Image (spheres, grey):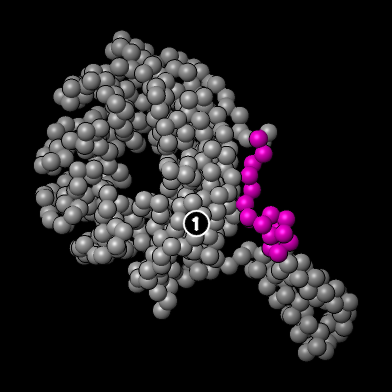
Amino acid sequence: MTPFEFLSRISFFSILSWSFFLIAVICAIVLTNFHNPLVRKYRSTLLSIAFSGLALGAASWSTPFLLRQINPDQSRMTPIDQLTITQWVEPVSNPTTSENSSAENAITPDEIGWAKKLGFKFKYKMGFQFEFEKLIASYDSTLVVLDKKGSLRGFNAYSGLNHWQINLDITQFVSRIQLQKKLFILDRNHQLDILRITCLDLQNPSVLWQRTIPNSRDGAMQIDLDNQNLIVSSGTNGIWALRSKTGEIGWKRPEIYSKIQTTIIGKQALAFEPSVMKRAGSWYFLDLLSGNTQQKVLHVYPDLGEAKSLGSIFVARVGNEQLFALNLPSLNPLWSFNLLEKPAFYEILSTGSYFVFYDSQSMEKRSIEKNELEWQKKFSNIDPRWIRFSADRSTFALPTSTDQSIAFYDTETGEYKSSAVASEPIVDFTYFGDWMYVFSEGRMWAYQK
């Protein structure tokens, strides 16, 4: 834990009360140690400030205890009548489906030609009435995106019509989990340091419930399918289990400082608490039904940058220096890999391999079980912001540093296949069944096999 993170765990009310007490102490020192006409002249004012500081300090110090009595869970469930209402907003113009179009939405041969090399046909080009931020979810025939003002926007993936929006005012998107037609979004408010969990129905676009967890800067989510609980790691406020249907609290462990996603192992959740200075960290095996600790194992790892799992193998990154793998549930070490340079990201494949992409634009593909190197490749003109895979994982795509195109490569060999070209900078890309979508800040291109 860094000094900044340690200070961030101090309550706002504690800082406020210390400030008021400090003002009172300074006034008392001035009154008792300085004897001059100016101090005597404002003696009554200084006394008033000192007593006010003491009173306000005591009030701010006791506020958390009063709030705990009013709301023991330190959390707020948004009343149903205050949930954000879905708005239906049709686009100003229909999507363009042919090359014979207006100059504004004109389709160039380059935008169609690259897709043909990958076996895709151009279907339509759509202009947004907002600034695109990122793709959030896909369900049935619907695509859901986040705009730069923090609103969710959905539309029909096959026609570009039937637009709706939900103004959630998301200031910092943290993570999301999609469970069939339900979408859970975890976001954080910069000013208030509040984690917020929102549950949405994607079939009938609407907010089902919303809950906040205060005084939390970091967070992650995991879904417990057997008990239909959402397991939320909230850093300073511990681990919470929320009913996925209602948002009600199933159980909570506020004393466990954990900010990475828990790992579900049978009927247990594996939670990670980092080591701090000379105090050892802990692995907690928590009962998914009650939250009780069934086993606690000490370790020496500091905060983990990322943690992912595939089957019985747990892979985590320590800073920018090391990747390591553990066998679950024994936590026996499988391998440790010292990174030679700063990684941009790593991604686990369902085929039993993983990718490590470095800031220097080199990539390695390794087996997850024995960490054996399968291939290594040095790229050029690549911006390591994200990586996207086809549905069968046979192809992966990376954005280029020019932002005008996306390069496609063969997953098995790393060989170059093709590039996607658009008339403006590309900010995201995704596969959806046998469809493929390219996004810029103001437009979307749709292709189908």
Q: Position of residue 373 (x, y in %)?
A: 12, 54
Q: Position of residue 44 (x, y in %)?
A: 89, 77
Name the amino acid type tagged 1. Gly
Callout 1: SS? loop
Q: Is residue 368 left or right of residue 238?
A: left
User: Can the viewer see residue 345 in this picture?
Assistant: no
Q: Nearer the viewer, residue 116 or 218?
A: 218
**Residue at x-position 42% and y-position 37%:** 178
Membership of 65 in magenta stretch: yes
Count of labels in the image = 1
Q: Is residue 227 left or right of residue 404?
A: right
**Residue at x-position 58% and y-position 49%:** 249
| Quadrant in which the N terminus is drawn | bottom left
Q: Residues within 10 Å of mark 1 (few under 14, many from 20)?
A: some
User: Can the viewer see residue 368 in this picture?
Assistant: yes
Membership of 124 in magenta stretch: no
| Quadrant in which the C terminus is drawn | top left
Q: Position of residue 411 (x, y in %)?
A: 16, 40
Q: Which residues are magenta?
A: 64-80
Q: Is residue 178 left or right of residue 414?
A: right
Q: Is residue 144 above or below residue 340?
A: above
Q: Position of residue 262 (x, y in %)?
A: 41, 54
**Residue at x-position 58% and y-position 67%:** 10
Point out the residue furthest to the top here: 100
Q: Which residue is the site of mark 1?
A: 291
**Residue at x-position 59% and y-position 45%:** 248
